[in-house]
Image (cartoon, grey):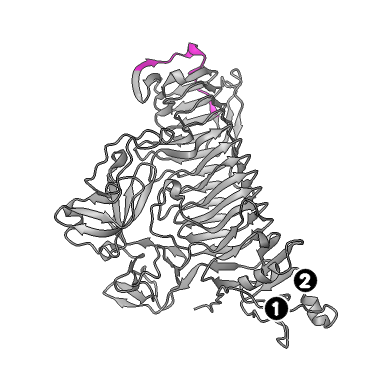
Amino acid sequence: MKKRWFILLIACALPAPILSLGADESKASSIIKAGTFFVAPNGSDSWSGRIKQPNADRTDDPLATLTAACNAARQMGTKRPRKVIIQSGEYFLNKPLVLTDKDSGLSIEAAPDARVILYGGREVGGWKKDGGKFYSAALPGVEQRQWDFRALVVNGRFCRRARLPEKGFFTHLSSFDVPWMTSTGGGWKRKPTSEELTRLKYRPEDLGTQLDIKNAELTVYHMWDESLVGVSAMDTESHTLTFANPSGHPPGAFGVKKYVVWNVRQGMNEPGQWYLDRTAGKVVYWPLPGEDMSKAEVFAPTIESIIRIRGSKNKPAKNITIRGLVLSITTTPLKAGGFGAGRFDGAVSISSGQNCGLVDLEIVNVGGQGVKVSGKNLRIENCHVHHTGACGIKFSGAGSLITNNYIHDAGLTYPSAIGLQGGGKDNQISHNEIHDTPYTAINWGGERNRIENNLIYRAMLKLHDGGGIYCFAGKGLVLRGNFIRDIPDTGGYGSSAYYLDERSENCLVEGNLSLRVARPTHNHMAKNNTIRNNVFICDEDARFTFPRSSDFVFERNIVYAKGKIVFDNTNAITRFKGNILYSAEGKVQGNKMSRYSRTGSEQLEPEQGNTFDDPLLVGFEKGNVSFAAQSPAAKLGINPIDVSKAGRRP
């Protein structure tokens, strides 16, 4: 097994002695700048940290801990830049590194060509056989709930927890028949009671007469989110489970009656699964074929966040940059995450930051968010965020740039997680590649934000009422040059490529491509928006929906459907012309609606300002959409679309 290097975060660092540059030429040659501190696995916090490697007589060393280096840099004040450079190695933190306004101007980065991994947990060893198939390792503090976690990483793999049922879902018997009044309308018509948020009536054939309630946790599914809850009681006569923590919505709300049980031994159905046995104080794992537990690298998280940058409204943390690091292994507390699993912290997080940057980071195998930030003029660039329990990147702020990030396999614990979520004003979200998310890929609101040149595919794999790009209460948003493909519809309130939801106004959806998404655009309680010069290609029917919306412009778009084309609530479209609406079945239907009910239907005709001719598309599969010479597109003023370079740039 590889040698491990441990960093234990300490409350304060020893004063860093200052070396004289003229005293020893050999020392001077390895000293960089007075404002630069080095951290290395073979370092010592007893020395200055001003040299890259220990000197020959061990009279000076790099520092051993990141905290010591940051404390030494802090002692120099904020009037000039300082830098912490970390040498290759694996570093384990037992509490988050916290930076504040007193660290403004600090840069923390990996040494050139170094691979630096910061772990927010411990390595687990001492594995022993536990029955015929399983192995277990004793963990101090688990039985007393001093150490609790919901993520385990084995040989670099974010492992699946023990699950009942093995596939699919249980169906519960709870109901909550109160109308949802929309988010703008204040949510539920009647506030749920405490009992409604903490009770679930189950089918006795699903759970039998015994459930290990000290270990069991439930995911209770709603429409666009879910609640992870513990179990405090099981009544086998009334067939009722009582939750240890309240759910976000009552079980049965929205007519959704699905749930899953996690973390019980009966749910160990296949190799690669695990559960935390709080009764016995151990973690139990079923190895994959050929996996040798005496050699396996197993990590369990101990903290929720690895690096936290904490400013305040009056004292923002300024000009702090984190660059080139790998962050891995964090956990989450037992609570319902809410919309977008937004209540959890990030492996790296910023609050009230200004001119701060997260650059060239890899964030992998973390239990909560990968990144969670807020502030002004922030930069999140070239980061690879993947295999997260919750969101990839969660953002709030102004004047910021989120670009060239690669986000995938998010929401492994919380299916309401979003690949990239944010809001605020005057931000640019561009050239990101996002795929394999259980819910929405990009969710954004706020004012005057630009969402451009992003590549999105395989989103909306589990939940409903979201999309590739889902905008809520957006004002003056621009969605341009994006390429969204292969978004399935898993039922419920459906899924879309481009979705303008409640209070979205004066937004522009232009020059985008949607490929193999049954509902290319959904618009709900939105007004004064323009959908122009997009290409929407559907393998079956194509559906465009505008419930409770008004004053839309839908012009110079191409719709190509192998089935029929349906527009719900055509009254919402005040300018509807110059479009190519090609249905292989020859059916283009317009429906009138009152709120969410259809009140009439008609077959639309070409003379109403659109043409039903074949657009004669060329080359759309890779994003470069052009037209054959006889296409009607040029006559209608429809421009070719090239989104082949959407997503990450080299």
Counting residues from the N terminus, which is met first, the one under dot 1 or under dot 2?
2
| Residue 600 versus residue 366 in the image, above or below | above
- Residue furthest to the left: 237
Mark 2 = which residue? Answer: 32
- Looking at the picture, how far across and down is residue 16, in whole percent? 71, 77
Three-letter amino acid code at the position of disc 1: Gln
Say if residue 404 shows up in the picture.
no
Q: Give above or below for 250 relative to 610.
A: below
Q: Is residue 399 magenta?
A: no
Apparent side of residue 241 relative to residue 555 in the rendered image (left or right) = left
Packing grade of label 1 (10 A; few <14, some 14-19, many >=20) is many
Which residue is label 1 attached to? 53
Please state which of residues 627 and 89 is positioned toward the viewer in this rendering: 89
Residue at image point 43% right, 27% down: 545
> What residue lies at 27% left-to-right and 46% top-to-bottom?
196
Instruction: Examine the rendered structure and indicate whether residue 278 appears above or below residue 470.
Output: below
Q: Magenta stretch?
A: 600-617
Q: Nearer the viewer, residue 376 or 545?
A: 376
